[in-house]
Image (tube, rainbow, N blue to C red):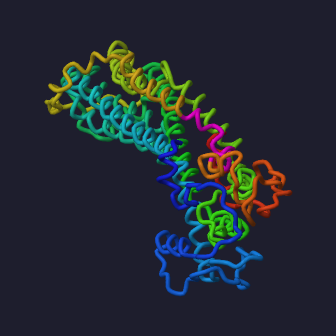
């Protein structure tokens, strides 16, 4: 994160200018504190101390020396300290959130475009090659690709059912228009019998099974990938709006605004002190780190598997070719199929008919039958690859979040005096704890208790999508 971005997002976390070595002795006026309180907190100056005075009623910013704060000021500072923390978390994750949300939207838009293209190509096939059945096939084609979209975007529909339903509906059309061209049966019951017979006599050979195999795997991969991206956004939204414990709130107040009470509004916390406060406040968030790391690795593996004949582009944009192969196979085996249908359904009472002609305007798609799978695959596959490469940079985002917040200009530079929670010192002398809940047992600044149910719920969701 750039220094400029940090300053925009966290101007509320301590005024980030250090003006040399400041000692807390000898502060005679609270004028600067009053100005900062009024400007930063939009609070009235009425009732604020003009000069330091004893503050026995303070709960957190207690000190032996006189204070520029009142109890009401401390309460207001506490609220703002939490708001500051929330804002700085949102700022730190904004680039990651934008990366995932932008690619999730682009991926969904691309899938919607592919579905429309695949439906158009299938409609063109019927219009150009099988005009007599084109209008009747339109409803089944539209229904199939509607179900494809519903499944991809999370609806509870079954690919096996909608693929079989399409070929079931296709067989009566092929039987009436190609195997017995020029005539059709006037009985809906007979057409239903032919439709039902499709699975017994397999007029399309193994093509429906091939379609189901390719669609089942490619649609599931794309559906899972999109769901995983949306889960990533949910994880970030959750951690952006955490509810901080009372202990954390007090520690943030002590680190950010208690110096104001001693007239030290321009100081920064010591690095070790900042780390202890931030690692304590974000201990539960740090527990996400191993699961987040595996989540990104799983997205990478899933993206790598979405290629070749199981790539969603390849499958959808070549569907019409398999439909054509299926119709041609049934046409070639027409005599045998006619005999089988007669055995199952009997001979139809047929009447001459003139089938309605195709109404699809394929002029805009006249070159659509010559599809460059390579170009299409490169578009989506390369986009996924670029996204995964960018996402890899955030594999340890939650494990290093506390350190990142302190390192990005929050702490005092090495060798300069800094705030240790009580006074201005040359260095922080307490032990600095690590990241995560277990490491907080010896944290001198923040007491961390138990687990966070909200974080646990997010971890469970990450485990589920990974599996």
Q: Position of residue 209 (x, y in %)?
A: 49, 25
Q: Which residues are magenta?
A: 391-404
Task: Say above or below: 378 vs 61.
Answer: above
Residue 394 located within the stretch drawn in magenta: yes
Name the side, left or right, on which 260 lies relative to 237: right
Q: Position of residue 265 (x, y in %)?
A: 59, 65
Task: Say above or below: 199 vs 178.
Answer: below
Task: Say above or below: 271 vs 372.
Answer: below
Quarter of the rendering occupied by the C terminus: top right
Q: Is residue 201 visible?
A: no
Q: Position of residue 370 (x, y in %)?
A: 28, 15
Name the side, left or right, on which 371 lies relative to 385: left
Furthest-top residue in this view: 332
Q: Quadrant of residue 132?
A: top left
Name the side, left or right, on which 10 lies relative to 398: left
Q: Position of residue 326 (x, y in %)?
A: 38, 20
Residue 260 located within the stretch drawn in magenta: no
Identified at 53% across, 59% down, the residue is: 87
Q: Viewer-proximal residue, 152 or 90? A: 90
Q: Viewer-proximal residue, 251 or 158? A: 251
Identified at 79% across, 64% down, the residue is: 447
Q: Quadrant of residue 277?
A: bottom right
Identified at 23% across, 25% down, the residue is: 124
Q: Quadrant of residue 205?
A: top left
Q: Viewer-proximal residue, 408 or 123? A: 408
Q: Viewer-proximal residue, 9 or 96? A: 9
Furthest-bottom residue in this view: 47
Q: Is residue 385 visible?
A: yes
């Amino acid at each position: 994160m750039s220094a400029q971005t940090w300053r925009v997002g966290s101007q509320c976390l301590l005024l980030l200018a250090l003006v040399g070595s400041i000692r807390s002795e000898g502060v005679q006026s609270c004028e600067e504190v009053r100005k900062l309180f009024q400007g930063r907190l939009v609070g009235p100056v009425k009732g604020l101390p003009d000069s330091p005075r004893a503050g026995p009623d303070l709960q957190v910013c207690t000190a032996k020396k006189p204070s520029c704060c009142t109890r009401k000021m401390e309460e207001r500072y506490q609220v703002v300290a939490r708001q500051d923390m929330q804002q700085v978390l949102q700022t730190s994750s904004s680039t990651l959130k934008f990366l995932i949300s932008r690619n999730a939207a682009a991926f969904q838009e691309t899938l919607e475009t592919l579905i429309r293209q695949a439906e158009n190509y299938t409609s063109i096939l019927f219009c150009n090659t099988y005009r007599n059945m084109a209008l009747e096939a339109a409803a089944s084609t539209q229904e199939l690709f509607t179900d494809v979209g519903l499944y991809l975007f999370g609806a509870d529909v079954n690919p096996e059912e909608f693929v079989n339903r399409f070929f079931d509906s296709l067989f009566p059309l092929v039987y009436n228009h190609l195997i017995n061209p020029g005539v059709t049966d006037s009985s809906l019951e007979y057409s239903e019998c032919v439709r039902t017979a499709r699975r017994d006599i397999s007029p399309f050979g193994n093509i429906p099974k091939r379609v189901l195999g390719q669609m089942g795997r490619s649609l599931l991969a794309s559906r899972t990938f999109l769901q995983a991206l949306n889960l990533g956004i949910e994880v970030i939204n959750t951690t952006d709006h955490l509810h901080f414990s009372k202990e954390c709130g007090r520690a943030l107040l002590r680190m950010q605004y208690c110096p104001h009470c001693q007239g030290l509004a321009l100081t920064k916390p010591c690095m070790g002190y900042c780390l202890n406060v931030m690692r304590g406040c974000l201990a539960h968030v740090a527990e996400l780190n191993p699961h987040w790391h595996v989540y990104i690795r799983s997205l990478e593996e899933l993206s790598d598997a979405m290629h070749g004949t199981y790539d969603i582009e390849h499958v959808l944009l070549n569907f019409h070719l398999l439909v054509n192969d299926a119709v041609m196979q049934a046409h070639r085996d027409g005599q045998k199929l006619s005999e089988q249908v007669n055995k199952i359904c009997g001979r139809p009472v047929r009447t001459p008919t003139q089938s309605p002609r195709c109404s699809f305007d394929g002029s805009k798609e006249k070159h659509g039958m010559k599809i460059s799978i390579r170009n299409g695959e490169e578009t989506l596959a390369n986009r996924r690859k670029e996204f995964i490469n960018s996402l890899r940079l955030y594999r340890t985002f939650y494990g290093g979040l506390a350190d990142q917040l302190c390192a990005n200009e929050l702490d005092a530079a090495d060798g300069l005096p800094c705030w240790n929670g009580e006074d201005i010192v040359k260095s922080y002398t307490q032990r600095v704890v690590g990241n995560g809940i277990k490491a907080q047992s010896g944290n001198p600044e923040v007491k961390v208790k138990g687990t966070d149910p909200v974080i646990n719920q997010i971890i469970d969701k990450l485990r589920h999508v990974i599996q």
